[in-house]
Amino acid sequence: MPWSITIGRIAGTAVRVHITFLLFLAWIGFSAFKQGGATAAQNNLIFIVALFFCVLLHEFGHILTARAFGIPTPDVTLLPIGGVASLERMPEKPSQELLVAIAGPAVNLVIAVLLIGFAGATMPTDVVSIDDTHIGLVARLAFANVFLAVFNMIPAFPMDGGRVLHAVLAMRMGPKPAMRIAARIGQGLAFLFGFLGLFGNPMLLFIAVFIYVAASSEAGDTEFRDTIKGLFVRDAMETRVAAIPIGANLGDAVDLLLATPQHEFPVVDGFNKPVGLLTREAIIGALAAATREAPVADIAQAPVPTVRSDIDLDKGLAQLRSSKAAAISVVDADGVLIGLLTRENIAEMMMIAQARPDWRFGRAA
């Protein structure tokens, strides 16, 4: 996620903090300082940091459960609204999706039980009390974890409850109709929150917009996953690809950029095997500092990931997402370049699928 700072790595997953979270901490500290001085500011900051540590544990509940089903998670990012674990994919089996979804709230309940049972926390009487610095840190933290567990079980995407609802429905009617119903319920709750927010609670309005957009996006993603099921990388790749030889110069790259509609160019060796990737942005950026004779090897991204043409498209898309690149080279069994898998091509597939749900993708092997 852009504007994120990596602060460490836990069990193979990079832990990142978004810059807005740091700004959020600064705002919390300043507001508390204005109201109660340095002591109040310190207490609030400690509480927020402890709370987000609990959020991180919540996300690792999802991450470790997903990993048990063979689903890796490259990174998790802390935001002011909570944590976002970037699972490469969701489990296909509803029972696995159910376990992954409930793992996060379960972690929060375990934390609350430990704080109440072993640390002697006394629960505040209402949600507003969480912000009361006169109440003990442990008590506030225990209540906050209970609140996180309950709030996340709201049956609407992107909350865990939305995934629980989808998993339960999918066990009875299949994933596609289950997602349609779960998305509609989420959108209905969004309208309800939005209506209640009109009576003086702007936070509910924010939550309503967030839930509605997330529910619509999740429904679209599910439709697309259903569309590409059974397809291979060769069915979605660009086949009319202009490549740049490793010995070419910047002038050759500019000429090729002007002559083709491509934005990404594989750099290949003498055996037509990809050894790098040259993007339009890299070419334009190099023009300001390099001469026409500058070798493309100096400005190309290398090494670059490649993907076999005969693997499942969903696995190819996972590689494309994890590469953080706009495109990855597609190769045959001998490693020879035969195409490109680009984000633009995938977006076009999504538009075609939305316009004609019955459209059949796929090429002959």
Image (cartoon, grey):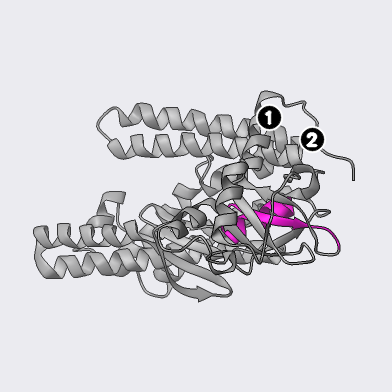
Name the residue rendered at 50%, 28% in the picture.
188
Mark yes or no: residue 296 visible: yes
> Would residue 67 be found to the left or right of residue 281 on screen?
right
**Residue furthest right as drawn:** 365
Per the model, the C-alpha gap separating discs 1 and 2 is: 10 Å
Q: Determine which quarter of the picture holds residue 266.
A: bottom right
> Would residue 66 be found to the left or right of residue 282 on screen?
right
Q: Which residues are magenta?
A: 314-333
Disc sitting over residue 361 in the figure: 2
Above or below for 341 versus 63: above
Observer-nearest residue: 230 or 267? 267
- Dot 1 or dot 2: first in sequence order is 1
**Mark 1–mark 2 CB contact (< 8 Å):** yes
Which element type, helix, strand or loop, lies under badge 1?
helix
Identify the residue position indicated by label 1 in the image. Answer: 352
* Amino acid type, callout 2: Phe
Q: Determine which quarter of the picture holds residue 7.
A: bottom left
> Would residue 142 be found to the left or right of residue 325 on screen?
left
* Amino acid type, callout 1: Ile
Above or below for 60 versus 361: below
Q: Determine which quarter of the picture holds residue 310.
A: bottom right
Q: In the rendered structure, does residue 316 fall within the stretch colored magenta?
A: yes
Disc sitting over residue 319 in the figure: none
